[in-house]
Image (cartoon, rainbow, N blue to C red):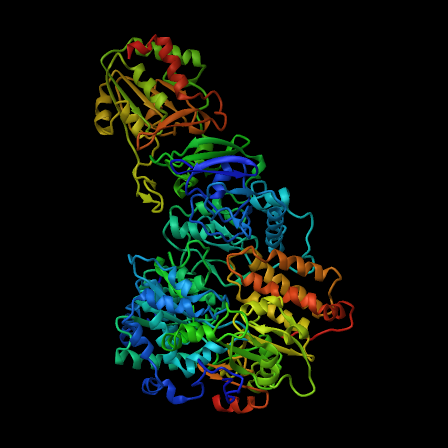
Amino acid sequence: MGFPHKPHPKETVVLSQYFGDAEARTLKGWTKRGGYEALAQVLKMDPVAVTDVVKESGLRGRGGAGFPTGLKWSFMPKEKKKPHYLCVNADESEPGTFKDREIMRWTPHALLEGTAIAAHAIRAEIAYIYIRGEFTEPWTFMERALEEANAAGVFGTIKIYLHRGAGAYICGEETALMNSIEGKRGNPRIKPPFPAAAGLFGMPTTINNVETLAAVPHIIKRGAAWYKGLCLSNPKSTGTKLFSVCGHVQRPGNYEVTMGFPLKDLIYDMCGGPRAGRTLKACIPGGSSVPILTRDETESCLLDYEGVVEKGSLLGSGGVIVFDDSTDMVYQIMRLARFYAHESCAQCTQCREGTAWTTKILERILAGQGKPTDLDLLLDLSENMTGKTICVLSDSCAAPVVSGIKKFRGEFDAYLAGKREAVLVG
Amino acid sequence: MADGVINLTIDGAPVSVPAGTLVIEAAKQAGVLVPHYCYHPGLPVAGVCRMCLVEIEKAPKLQIACATTVTEGMVVKTQSAPAKDARQSVLEFLLINHPLDCPICDQAGECELQDFVFQEGQPGTRYGEYAKRFNPVEDFGPDVLYVPNRCILCTRCVRFMEDVAKEPVLNVSERGDRAFIGIHPEARLDHPWAGNVVDLCPVGSLLSKDFLHKARAWELDKTASICTGCSQGCNISLDTRDEVVVRVRPRPNLDVNRYFICDHGRMHYKWMNRGDRIEAPLVRRDGELKATDWDEAFDRIVGILRGASGKAVALVSPGASSESLALAKRLLSGFAWTGAFQIVMGEEAPLPGVPNLALRAERAPNARGAENLGYTRDYAQALEAAKTAAVVLVLDDPDSTVETNGALIYLGTVLPPDAACRRADVVLPIANVAEEEGTFTNRDGRDQRYYQAKSAPGMAQPAAWVLGEIAAALGVTEAAR
Amino acid sequence: MTVQADYQPVFVDKVMEELQLVLQRYPTKQAALLPALWIAQREHGWISDHIMAEVAELLGITPAYVKGVVTFYTMYHQHPVGKNFVQVCTTSPCNICGAEDVVKALLEQTGAQDAGATSPDGKWTIVEVECLGACGFPTPVLVNDDFLENVTPENVPEIVKKYR
């Protein structure tokens, strides 16, 4: 539910059932609530059978890419010749997204159980849960839960370790995450080779998001057909998703709904819509790296992978950022560009230089020194930054810029015409 | 596809290469240079500069040629509009923080950034409103300066130190456009092979202090040569300006030194410019060495050799050409012959990332060549024999402490004032390695040729010519060997 | 590398034992680098060049390599910081909910003049950081390891009082 709010009737509560329930964090409390039954079942199953169940369920990666999870697991080598690794991506740093944090601090055992099940399915001996350095509270709860679970020996021979990040958004990219675990700079790797062939320490590896793995025990217990049946629109998008709604809404928080749920209902019904006296101006549906939607697009958008693509954006991480009519879109787009410029790892020329240049141009426009050619320049730079780099951070910087200029051109023009000037902080 | 050979098309030209070849290498076969910075055949692939983006049919996005392996039937376009636009954008991005230093930058004229910008960059900048970032020059160590402002973060230097020299003393520090090449304050870039980072740097960011502001790239003549620093036989280029050797750079040879030379060899050229040369033949007249012409010198020597019999000793340099060493022996073929050389030894310094490549303990290029011809390392014994020899021939060994009752003939580049060879009967001026053509045999038995980079001073001539002329005058033919 | 005469190694006794346990979790020593740096920062407050060299030696890598890693990640301090290291998120979702006002309030109330600079009494360093992953609880503020949610300019005085 949208903790700390009460569950909304329109929510489909699966992952978030025990958000706010302190007892659920303990091993005793968790097992009382049916925890670790799925794992016990899985440990007696053939790994391929486990993968088949997840494939059948239609579960797709909840970190942002939406890749079918069962299919990803099946990429691991059929013949076991080397150590296999599972990496759990708890580096949640996509602006607008705060769901993995809740899963870890309220239901740490859910994540541990999903991790162990996945490790069994891909025949990984060791799983590392990479938790971003700033998540001090989730870390504490995960550490305690892990200690309890290890003491009770629930994982069999699978070893699960926590690994703490140290402040780098780019480490949420799966290959950068592996480099970070290996004790290197968090630079994304060129692919091929793909992680399933040569990943962590050069061994076959699968990387999964926290929310994805938290869903796995439920799928095992209640069956693939049940999960597949949770679908309001496109059959390729099944199950529930935690949408992190933030920004200009009355009741921000995580809300769990079935795939295909109308974005309009999420914002107005569940979150109470914008603050009093305000109207919705724009919305970013999937974390800051996806194109911005206008009000009309937002209000007619269905929340599944295909539905959001239809509106010209992406479901991404499901971090819904709502902007009301008080928002200076140019300023916020600048602030996002600044975010990407700060987080660029510096490998690729377009990203390293382009994110900083984009930020500078936007700052100049905000300071009242914009030129008529600036918008075309921004669009040209954004095109040069898209589809040409090792990872998509560069493309992610371009997304709000391009969609922002396209859909909120008036605000940019106002600055260029000298009708507006902003005060830049930081 | 047969026997692991892949056929593909690059810019319309059909190319056949072994399976596993990178597109960027296959392109070379089609005569196409795909512009690039971070890629280097001697380093692991990084794929970071994004300059080598090419269009490949059926691929949804542009692909980097340096990390894409050829597949059968692949169609590659390096000159299509999307590929050129991508390259032009990379150049633009590189130039926004790159200072307009060309007039004061050593790399000008041999700079890959200049080259590609000229070839396909934009005519003007769109970044006019901002100051470029500024960081002061850093001294990395014995010979290397780092100019952060010019750095394009290709990371060739970092990869060389980490993967080839196996001493990761350079890093990338910071993130984003704040990134630069860093070194831990307690460390220096003093690895015996570190100088290669200067060659690898595509721009003027890593510079050699030795070469700093010495000459412009376009003033240099480049001549293929072989390093005389040790017996590895690294292939080098002697860069000269106005008859002075100003720089040594490695020449690629996949079987010997790949793309690298060690710092010892890199610095081992200043002696080639020595001014204190013997510039004319000298013969002893009235107890003193007097300058003369080649004819008189040759006459004197022929007279000495015809009039002598018994023992002859040749004391030679292990840095003399094989041709001169062979002729020196042939000249003395009528005598009971002893030939020897002394060789300076030093510490070996391998380059771990390349098999069979090291700065060798033997600090001379042609010991093996000399040994193949019958010269030995038993210099002490030769010195002893020389005392009672009829003729002693010293070839380019100015430090020899030879004493003899017989005739002493000295061929050399220099003759120090207190040298034992000042007592020679005849002194002949010869060219040094930069002033002649010749052959060295390296420690692995590989014969390699070096070429003339500058003129010999005065009347000096290659030792092989000098000895050849004497041999001809003596009538010592091939058959008489 | 030359060791500073009065340098006190961090990894001794119990701390070294802790590192040994960490090393068991990974197949390579290098993979223990991030955890080792966290331990060092916990013990010493920040990571000096000397500590980088000590860690490098323990893990069989070079000081330059360690430095490259330390400078990549924003949470490792390369110089001393105030007793309370305060990180305030100002990325867009929090930005539109008043994050910049929270920064301003913190700077005013603590006496730290600029973001990034330590206050004259040495007790506070306030920095603006990127998304802290708590966008639904604007504005999130990390005071050392304490993750505070829903910070507004109104409750800043209380926070400052608590940590001072």
Q: Is residue B473 visible?
A: yes
Query: Which is nearer the eye, B237 or A229?
Result: A229
Q: Is residue A312 above or below residue B279?
A: below
State the image coordinates of residue A375 (x, y, percent, origin top left): 71, 62
Residue B353 vertical position relative to residue C37 in the rendered view, above or below: above
Quadrant containing the N terminus of chain C is bottom left
Residue A163 is situated, as x and y percent measured from the top left of the image, at 38, 71
Number of marks in the image?
0
Query: Residue A161's quadrant in the figure?
Result: bottom left
Which residue occupies the foreground of this view, B358 or A79? Answer: A79
Residue at the location (56% across, 59% down)? A351
Q: Which quarter of the picture shows residue B300?
A: top left
Residue A271 spot, x, y in % from top left: 58, 84
Residue B247: x and y in percent read 49, 38
**Is residue A178 visible to us here?**
no
Which residue is at the front of the view, A332 or B451? A332
Task: Give the residue displayed 40% in from the left and 55% down from the top.
Answer: B169
Q: Is residue A379 left or right of residue B11?
A: right
Q: Give the residue displayed 43% in from the left and 65% down from the top.
A: A177
- Residue at 47% x, 20% y is B459
* Near-viewer residue (B52 or A21): A21
